């Protein structure tokens, strides 16, 4: 029952997040308004030059709503202060006393943290988004297969996001300013994964380059698959690339984790 | 003169049970409990008196202090401190009192103590001659000399507490509230704090209200004790009335037990 | 002994507070520099978005790149100034939790003044600097004919805009008296206004413009001054309209006072 302990870590974190009820309601309201404003901006831009708009407007609306609904899954910024604190003040030693793999433990924690946040918030946002009048309305994916692909790509992208955050935690052992590292990664990821603006809005060459980076395997892939902006062979290729990054990032994270543990045990934190 | 008459105070707190299912349930529907912090509390304290206010954790000591210092409004009852209703005339009231919370600091953490004092001078609008006189006197009595130039974060707990005491007395208050002033202090510091408070009361006639769990504080500083438990005053009398046999800690523990608190 | 001494003036006390806060901050120079740099970079992403969208579309609702940069920097200046001065209200729930507000209540001074004095976030200068750079770049691109009135208008706008944001922080703090978990909804009006205030308010439609004129006066400190300074309107009224936004502070202060009274009766 090796996985059982990680499951109970997951459940514990999940229950903890449920306590913050008003925060969840507030999150829904905030994300809803932001989605609305965001769509307004793109609508105004399209009105000034419809020919330059790189994707269908319905596709964009769906992209924005999914982004707002699942923000907690993709924002690199949402990392846990407790973990950073334990790295900085040396409380990490307590964690090391437990018969548990640190990487897996933190991975389970992060997954629970992100999923509880997202699960509590996504339903009302999506429901409202489907009921809005056009051009704000969110649409269903073109067919069932697309939906299946979307779910699959979502799972992969969440894994990529968490694996990337794990990398930041692990690198924190080797830097004087974990918060600086965190800001840097969060900012870069925000641009490169398509949170600031979706990748199709960048010039062609810039976009090509961005799509090869691990960041594009986060929010960008599932949200564009959902509305059919990426489909067929292109979608398969994108998901394979996601799989590649999952493996690479986790391997890198675990490797650095082992190094970090050595450093902690030698220097005493 | 402090008069508390039939003061009542209740709080509303969210109920929280353990377990995953309970967490989900309370997310959907939250239940509240009403907790009675003070139930018909009455007492009066004369000018220049020292009073030890004791009781187990959660008995209502802090609530009483907060009402007397104008932070909280009671649900019902009357309270007059030197003719003022604390929560009605907050600013006028707190200008005449000093409050020390043993577990918290009123000094600015990263600047020398002296800088904190200067800021307090402006906050309390202390005339400069009064300020200088008080500061010099307190510096001498509490032996603050070198400490004044040190940032607060570099002080030991005992040193800090001496500075806290001085900080709350710069504006020559008529009444001093002390909430666990000796908590965590070493023996030397404890004695210094106690002796200072006794002297303050004797020389300046400052009324002192002290809450503490340390019975030696009570023994050293005050004769009168007020015992509160579960929001009610259970005993108000002279220390010698309860102190019979053996040491005070046992006597008080027995007292708590006899009142079932 | 009980004679009432003359009160130290509020301005003098406030300046004293700030000088202590700055002295505190200078104890941690490295952390100060890092945070300031972080603040400088933090809003850079929004700029990236604007840049690439304009490369593609060239204009939005009749506004050019330079107009949007003007709005972006104006709002950012207002916001960072407000955060610098009124951070104590922004993180007020922490102040209450740690019992610092109890301490404030035991001091014979106005509570608002004390909370303002409780923190002074000089690190927001980082954000301010970015805003100033974008402002200079944006206005140089826009070919604005500057005169004294326009300069005065910018000054008034930034100060009044900052006070609008302070008002919202004040509401946020007041709400902490009602729910200790704090209400993140207010983020819509702080971070949201900062993010979406990049574009002139009328980009979001007529109804939004009305809301931001009469309910929360964002347009008074963004849209109307923009019209005046870019020469879309010559009406001097628009230049002084930002002053009207100060009225917004009245209900904010009223709510705060109500909250303080409730704190006294509810406790924590």
Image: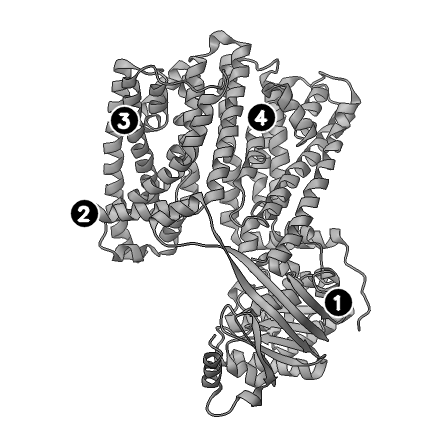
Q: Earlier in the sequence, mark 3 or mark 2?
A: 2
Q: Is label 3 on the same chain as label 2?
A: yes
Q: Which residue is mark 1?
A: B84
Q: Nearer the viewer, mark 3 or mark 1?
A: 1
Query: Which residue lies at the image location 42% right of the left edge and 27% below the top edge?
Result: A67
The residue sitting at 52% across, 52% down in the picture is C28
Numbered disc in front, either 4 or 2: 2
Check the image and report above or below for B174 versus C122. Answer: below
Image x and y of residue B96, in percent: 73, 68
Position of residue B79 relative to residue A181, above or below, is: below
Q: Under tag 3, what secondary structure?
A: helix
Marks 4 & 3 on one chain: no
**Disc 3 crowd, CA 10 A, few/some/many (<14, 14-19, 20+):** few
Query: Residue C17: horizontal and vertical position, in percent?
Result: 66, 54
Q: Are marks 1 and 2 in contact (CB under 8 Å)?
A: no
| Rendered location of residue C178, percent (x, y) | 58, 48
**Would residue B168 be seen by someone viewing this image from the given angle?**
no
C60 w.r.t. B76: above or below:
above
Disc 2: CA contacts within 10 A as few (<14), some (14-19) or many (>=20): few
Q: Which residue is mark 4?
A: C198
Callout 3: residue from which chain?
A: A
Query: In front here: A71 or B162?
Result: A71
Q: Quadrant of residue A166?
A: top left
Closest to the camera, between mark 1 and mark 4, is 1
Contact (CB < 8 A) between labels 1 and 4? no
Number of callouts: 4
C-beta proximity under 8 Å, tags 3 and 1 = no
Front-most of residues A193 and B46: B46
């Amino acid at each position: 029952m090796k996985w059982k302990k990680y499951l109970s870590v997951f459940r514990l974190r999940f229950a903890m997040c449920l306590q913050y009820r008003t925060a969840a309601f507030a999150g829904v309201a905030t994300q809803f308004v932001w989605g609305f404003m965001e769509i307004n901006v793109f609508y105004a831009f399209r009105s000034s030059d419809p020919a330059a708009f790189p994707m269908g407007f319905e596709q964009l609306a769906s992209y924005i709503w999914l982004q707002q609904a699942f923000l907690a899954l993709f924002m690199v910024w949402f990392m846990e202060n407790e973990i950073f604190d334990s790295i900085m003040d040396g409380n990490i030693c307590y964690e090391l006393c437990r018969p548990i793999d640190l990487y897996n433990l933190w991975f389970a924690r992060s997954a629970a943290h992100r999923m509880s946040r997202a699960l509590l918030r996504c339903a009302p946002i999506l429901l409202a988004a489907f009921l809005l009048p056009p051009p704000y309305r969110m649409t269903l994916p073109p067919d069932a297969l697309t939906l299946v692909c979307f779910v699959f790509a979502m799972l992969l992208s969440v894994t990529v996001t968490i694996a990337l955050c794990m990398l930041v935690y692990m690198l924190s052992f080797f830097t004087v300013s974990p918060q600086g590292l965190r800001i840097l990664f969060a900012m870069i990821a925000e641009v490169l994964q398509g949170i600031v603006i979706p990748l199709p809005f960048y010039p062609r060459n810039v976009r090509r380059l961005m799509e090869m980076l691990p960041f594009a395997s986060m929010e960008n892939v599932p949200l564009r698959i959902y509305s059919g902006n990426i489909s067929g062979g292109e979608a398969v290729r994108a998901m394979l690339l996601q799989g590649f990054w999952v493996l690479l990032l986790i391997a890198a994270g675990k490797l650095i984790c082992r190094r970090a543990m050595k450093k902690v045990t030698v220097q005493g934190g | 003169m402090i008069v508390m008459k039939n003061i009542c105070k209740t709080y509303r707190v969210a109920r929280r049970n353990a377990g995953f299912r309970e967490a989900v349930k309370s997310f959907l529907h939250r239940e509240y409990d009403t907790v009675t912090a003070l139930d018909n509390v009455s007492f009066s304290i004369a000018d220049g008196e020292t009073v030890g206010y004791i009781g187990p954790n959660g008995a209502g000591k802090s609530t009483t202090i907060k009402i007397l210092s104008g932070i909280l409004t009671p649900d019902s009852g009357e309270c007059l401190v030197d003719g003022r209703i604390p929560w009605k005339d907050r600013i006028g009231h707190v200008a005449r009192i000093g409050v020390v919370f043993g577990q918290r600091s009123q000094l600015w953490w990263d600047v020398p103590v002296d800088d904190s004092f200067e800021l307090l001078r402006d906050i309390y609008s202390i005339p400069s001659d009064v300020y200088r006189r008080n500061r010099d006197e307190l510096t001498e009595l509490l032996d603050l000399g070198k400490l004044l130039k040190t940032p607060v974060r570099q002080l030991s707990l005992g040193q800090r507490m001496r500075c806290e005491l001085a900080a709350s007395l710069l504006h020559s208050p008529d009444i001093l509230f002390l909430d666990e002033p000796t908590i965590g202090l070493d023996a030397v510091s404890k004695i210094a704090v106690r002796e200072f408070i006794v002297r303050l009361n004797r020389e300046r006639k400052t009324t002192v209200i002290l809450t503490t769990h340390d019975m030696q504080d009570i023994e050293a500083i005050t004769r009168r004790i007020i015992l509160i438990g579960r929001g009610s005053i259970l005993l108000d009398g002279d220390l010698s009335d309860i102190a019979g046999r053996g040491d005070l800690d046992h006597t008080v523990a027995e007292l708590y037990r006899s009142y079932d608190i | 002994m009980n004679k009432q001494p003359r009160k130290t003036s509020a301005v003098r006390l406030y300046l004293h507070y700030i000088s202590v806060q700055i002295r505190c901050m200078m104890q941690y120079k490295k952390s100060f520099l890092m945070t300031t740099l972080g603040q400088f970079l933090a809003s850079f992403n929004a700029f990236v978005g604007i840049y690439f969208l304009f490369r593609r579309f060239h204009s939005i609702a009749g506004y050019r790149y330079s107009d949007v940069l003007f709005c972006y920097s104006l709002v950012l200046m207002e916001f960072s100034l407000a955060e610098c001065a009124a951070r104590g209200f922004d993180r007020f729930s922490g102040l209450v939790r740690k019992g610092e507000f109890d301490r404030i209540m035991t001091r014979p001074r106005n509570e608002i003044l004390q909370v303002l004095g409780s923190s002074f976030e000089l690190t927001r200068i980082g954000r301010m600097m970015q805003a100033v750079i974008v402002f200079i770049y944006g206005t140089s691109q826009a070919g604005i004919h500057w005169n004294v009135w326009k300069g005065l208008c910018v000054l008034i706008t930034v100060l009044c805009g900052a006070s609008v944001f302070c008002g919202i922080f004040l509401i946020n703090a007041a709400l902490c008296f009602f729910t200790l978990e704090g209400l993140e909804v207010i983020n819509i009006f702080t971070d949201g206004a900062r993010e979406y205030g990049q574009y002139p308010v009328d980009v979001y439609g007529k109804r939004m413009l009305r809301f931001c004129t009469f309910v929360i006066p964002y347009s008074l400190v963004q849209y109307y001054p923009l019209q005046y300074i870019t020469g879309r309107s010559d009406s001097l009224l628009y230049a002084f309209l930002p002053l009207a936004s100060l009225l917004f502070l009245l209900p904010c202060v009223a709510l705060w006072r109500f909250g303080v009274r409730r704190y006294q009766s509810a406790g924590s």
